[in-house]
Image (cartoon, rainbow, N blue to C red):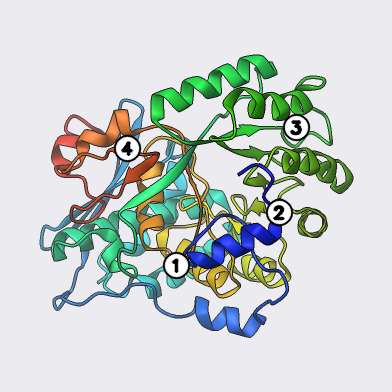
Amino acid sequence: MQGLTRRKWIGLAAVTPTLSLGGTDRSASPSMEQLKQVAEQPVLQFQGLDRPVVIHSIRLLRKGREHFVHVRSTDGAEGLCVTNERARYLYPILKTLVIPYFIGKDVRDLEGHLWELYRYQSNYKLQGLAFWCPQAWVELAILDMFGRILNKPMAELVGGIRRRWIPFYVASERRDTTPEEEVEYLQQLLQETGARAVKFRVGGRMSRNQDAMPGRTEKLISLARKVLGDQIDLHADANSSYDPPEAIRVGRMLEDVGAVFFEEPCPFDHLEDTRLVTEALEIPVAGGEQEYSEWRFRWSIHRRVVDIVQPDIQYYGGLIRSLRVARMADLAGMPAAPHISGGFGFVYMLIFASCAPRLARYQEYKKGVERYGEWFDPPLTVRDGALSVPTGPGVGIKDIHAVISGAEEV
């Protein structure tokens, strides 16, 4: 990928319109009204739920370091969500402001219920990660239940499976390493995962232009390319480290080594600064993991604040909301690459990626097949730098009772 210009990125993306190499054509932008119309189309697309699916119970369970949301209907149907780590301190919101809304309700019109949940007890005042994560956990558990009732994979309920294998980059989450140590760690991750692309961190994280250690970013960028070679694709994440001039300077270094994208160069909520960087650079700019508003996503897509949208399926409130973002981005010719936080989250990424209309070349992965792969039938596997998509009913876990056996209710 070294030496690709934006024009070449765009040209290559045009060959495979649903799998973009990263670049997007900024010359045309859909109107806000066009984006609104796309976002408002129903995401759930299934038939066969002819009888009410009334929620009898929703429980938060804990087993070791894992948390689960388990749903059961009055007819005995069940579904499960494996949450991110934030359940350990967001459980009061889940138990007092989200679960009570659903008890006793027929959830076949799940999209309508999600809107009413937003209004319930003035939950909209809590909009942000603290509210959207609990909503996502319940939504994903209900979608798992629907899939088990209908004997269909979750992706078939939200648009249909377009892809069976998802190419991925493996992400390092470290800034405590020297450039030499980080490149050695990246080599280890590549060997352990079979990835053909990596992402490393630059800057100091929300650091007002300060590096994690003096000179780390500059040396890491050049050393990663030198040691890993041209056959490994590079991505970089600044975690909101820079103002526009410094972001552009670092972005130019990434362009020089042919990196695939530059993630969150400026403070995540400073959309205008990010847009200035996007306009100045050839390398595609990615962002959106900290975005919680559909309206701001819509505005950002309309204004081309970034080139690649990155909703986090749990931070943003679930698969349904995230796919609305992907639809809007697709209308604008922009690919999606959802952010994940590790753990079981890569499985929900795989489901999203299997059915989203347009993807970036690689999706994020932070390991997990070695821990969770055998939960599935067939097991999740890696082949040629790509992850297999779950094919079983719902999320694809073959035996949810075995998974939660011994768990305690929180």
Label 3 vs label 2, nearer the camera: 2
Which residue bears the numbered disc 2? 5
Distance, label 3 to label 2, CA atoms, is 24 Å
**Residue 95 visible here:** no
Mark 1 / mark 2, whichever is N-terminal: 2
Look at the numbered discs 3 and 2 and tell me whether their residues touch, using CB distance below 8 Å: no
Mark 3 / mark 2, whichever is N-terminal: 2
Which residue bears the numbered disc 1? 357
Which secondary structure lies at badge 4?
strand
Q: Residue at x 65, y 32 (%)?
A: 201
Q: Residue at x 61, y 64 (%)?
A: 11
Dot label at residue 382: 4
Tell me where residue 216 sits by quadrant: top right
Amino acid type shown at disc 1: Pro
Amino acid type shown at disc 3: Gly
Which residue bears the numbered disc 3? 203
Distance, label 4 to label 2, CA atoms, is 30 Å
Query: Viewed as shown, does residue 68 lie left or right of 266?
Result: left
Q: Residue at x 54, y 35 (%)?
A: 231
Which secondary structure lies at badge 1?
loop
